[in-house]
Image (cartoon, helix red, strand yellow):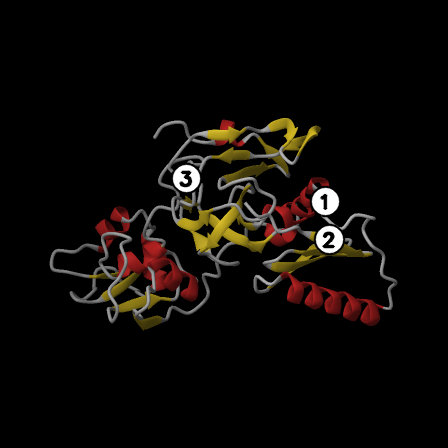
Amino acid sequence: MKIFPTRTLRIFRFVLSISSHEAVFVYTSKKAIYVKTIRRGMVPVSLKCAATAAVLLLTVTMGLIFLPLSGKNDINNDEDDKIKNQILMSNETDFTLPDDKSTLEIRKHTVKSGGESLSSIAMKYRISIDTICGSNNLRTYEPLPAGKALIIPSKDGILYTMRNGSNIVAVAKQYNVSLEKILVENSIKNSDFIKMGSVLFIPDAKPQNIIKGFIWPVSGRAITCGYGWRKNPFSAAEREFHAGLDIKANYEWVKSAMYGKVTYSGWMGGYGMTIIIAHPDGSKTLYAHLSQLVVQNGQYVKQGQIIAKSGSTGRSTGPHLHFEVIKNGRQVNPYTELVRKK
């Protein structure tokens, strides 16, 4: 398996992590950490040229002197962890509530030929797959035929048509959504006078967390490397602290362990393609070494929603999922947090 080396350059508060996939700029100020990802092609030479130009531009603009991070070109695991933890503990990756004041818009989308999927459509419109399924009476996540017409709400929830015998109170109870929230969202003043055939938007119609706690992010539960100290897989003579679980997952779909907001989706040095999800209780989950990302920054995801595909990007010896749980500002053993029952 060919491993593309990751290189790191530093200009005082700027850190530039370069890989064959992307360049990640991390700027650390006294109050916050800012991350900018520039995705490139797979040609290392062009990436190096782009990275060199970026560094020179920053040097001239800021009037700084370029200082290499170390005498080595290849990034080591300590530096990978430092960059990752800076991003993880930053306010930039904290959970924030959706903007409920935004105006609801109903858009139409025609499925394009060439393999357009539910996940790519959800990513394009920044809503969940469940919102698309619920609003279009889709029963599965199976591929859609080209030419199929979809209605796409601008918020997560579903569009519900009032039928004969429908009762708004029962609808609210059915979808576990407060009646007041439904009335406000649809500008309804009197719940006793809703015409049959009216189309109502039921915000967050599916329960945010079906199961209490963190669910397993992949179907299997075989752990190839646990939480704690271990031998460095690239240098057996060295020991390193492994802040998460490596779960066996051979290029399979990865699910969100809990409802939350995607606050990082992109390349993260030796961790490869990585997603961070912030949760309402202040915790965060991290999913690394991914081969495909299907959600983006700012998107809200349900518990169990597909967010990526596992892989072997970054500093990896083979396909798997690196999974971390962060509580109270520090990494904890994910195994103790995961729901045991199937």
Q: Nearer the viewer, residue 278 or 333?
A: 333
Which part of the image, by quadrant, shows the C terminus? top left
Q: Are marks 3 and 2 in contact (CB under 8 Å)?
A: no
Question: Which numbered disc, 2 or 1, marks the residue that appears first in the sequence?
Answer: 2
**Which secondary structure, mark 3?**
loop
- Between label 3 and label 2, give the one nearer the viewer: 2
Which residue position holds label 1?
Answer: 79
Instruction: Residue 202: tell me if it is visible.
Output: no
Q: Looking at the rendered structure, which numbered label has been put on residue 159?
A: none
Graded by Cα atoms within 10 Å as few (under 14), some (14 to 19) or many (20 or more), the crowding at tag 2 reads many
Residue 234 location, quadrant: top right
Residue 123 location, quadrant: bottom left
Q: Do the residues labelled 3 and 1 touch (CB within 8 Å)?
A: no
- Residue type indicated by callout 2: Thr
- Residue type indicated by callout 3: Val
* Distance of label 3 from label 2 (alpha carbons): 31 Å
Task: Point out the residue furthest to the left here.
Answer: 164
Image position of 294 (left or right of 95): left
Which part of the image, by quadrant, shows the N terminus? top right
Which residue position holds label 2?
Answer: 8
Q: Are marks 2 and 1 in contact (CB under 8 Å)?
A: yes
Graded by Cα atoms within 10 Å as few (under 14), some (14 to 19) or many (20 or more), the crowding at tag 1 reads some
**Which secondary structure, mark 1?**
helix
Which residue position holds label 3?
Answer: 218
* Distance of label 2 from label 1 (alpha carbons): 8 Å
Image position of 27 (left or right of 65): left
| Residue 294 image offset from top left, x and y in percent | 44, 56
**Which secondary structure, mark 2?**
strand
Q: Nearer the viewer, residue 128 or 202?
A: 128
Question: Which numbered disc, 3 or 2, marks the residue that appears first in the sequence?
Answer: 2
| Residue 19 image offset from top left, x and y in percent | 64, 56
